[in-house]
Amino acid sequence: MKYTASVLGAVWSLLNPVVFLAVFTFVTIVLGNNVPDYPVYLLSGLLAWNLFSVALGGGARSVVDNGSLVKKVYFPREILPLSVVGVALVDVIAGFGATVAILAALTARERTGEGQRIEIDLLSSALAALVNQASGYLEAGAVPVRLGNVHPSIEPFATYAAADGPLMICAGNDHQFAALAEAVEAPELAEDARFASNPARVEHRAALRELIEERLASAPVEAWVDRLRAAGVPAGPVNDIAAAFGLATELGLDPVDEHDGVRTVASPLGLRGTPAATRRRPPGLDEHGAEIRAWLAGSE
């Protein structure tokens, strides 16, 4: 559905004097409603618009590969210069933002007796989700470079090549780094001046990666996961979706909700007193269309 900012504003100006208790939420794609008569679209889950928001919002420039791993495994850098995650995350983030805003508006209505209009746009949602990257730019003028899976300010905190695939290692402090060095049978790394502190490791991350991967090449991912976890170093494989659901099940998280023969992802909200519950399975195409149209006709 296509609207303009002035049309949405006019709708609200007509509703506001009459419907005091209503809370209306407009979720718009990319630019929001502050640009007069600029076409905006109600959130429809279109992947292209999510990608557009990621591109405009700076996310793609901070998550793409820096070339080191791409050249080694997968594609030449020139073939895949930019990439984003495979899920419409900005749409999801905007939805979470809308939920929080609705709850805040309902709380305000309890105090004032009046509803209000809520606006959520994808570009603002994308910028808010940049968290530390946005703070680095706003406070220090630092524009992120293309780092791929590397953490901008912690090392080693990235994926590394083991004998049979990528291994995620998150050694976030000097103690964990020393344990990592012991686990890969290179204790001298912790004594090397280039790697003696986190800032030094970040500065010399290319040299450190080469030395770590020389050791990791001697064993498969699973063996390193066991060895590193035993040493107190956070590490794990890069799971596909099936493995991720399997891990959640193994941990007792009950990640799948099945209702009336339809399986969906269970709610991540863990409420002890009022747990989330599925009241109805997702409908088929136009399954309740006649019921809704009859309700709309009766409300005219």
Image (spheres, rainbow, N blue to C red):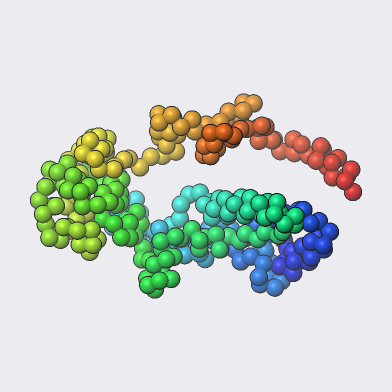
Q: Quadrant of residue 145?
A: bottom left
Which residue does the image show at 35% across and 57% down from the upper left? Answer: 148
Q: Is residue 6 above or below residue 253?
A: below
Q: Nearer the viewer, residue 114 or 64?
A: 114
Which residue does the image show at 84% across and 45% down from the upper left? Answer: 296
Q: Residue furthest front?
A: 111
Q: Is residue 269 above or below residue 130?
A: above
Q: Residue furthest top?
A: 261
Residue 231 visible (yes or no) = yes
Q: Nearer the viewer, residue 114 or 99?
A: 114
Q: Position of residue 163 (x, y in %)?
A: 23, 41
Q: Position of residue 153 (x, y in %)?
A: 30, 60
Which residue does the image show at 40% across and 29% down from the upper left? Answer: 250
Which residue does the image show at 80% across and 41% down from the upper left? Answer: 292
Q: Quadrant of residue 280?
A: top right
Q: Is residue 115 above or below residue 220?
A: below
Residue 43 visible (yes or no) = no
Q: Position of residue 3 (x, y in %)?
A: 73, 63
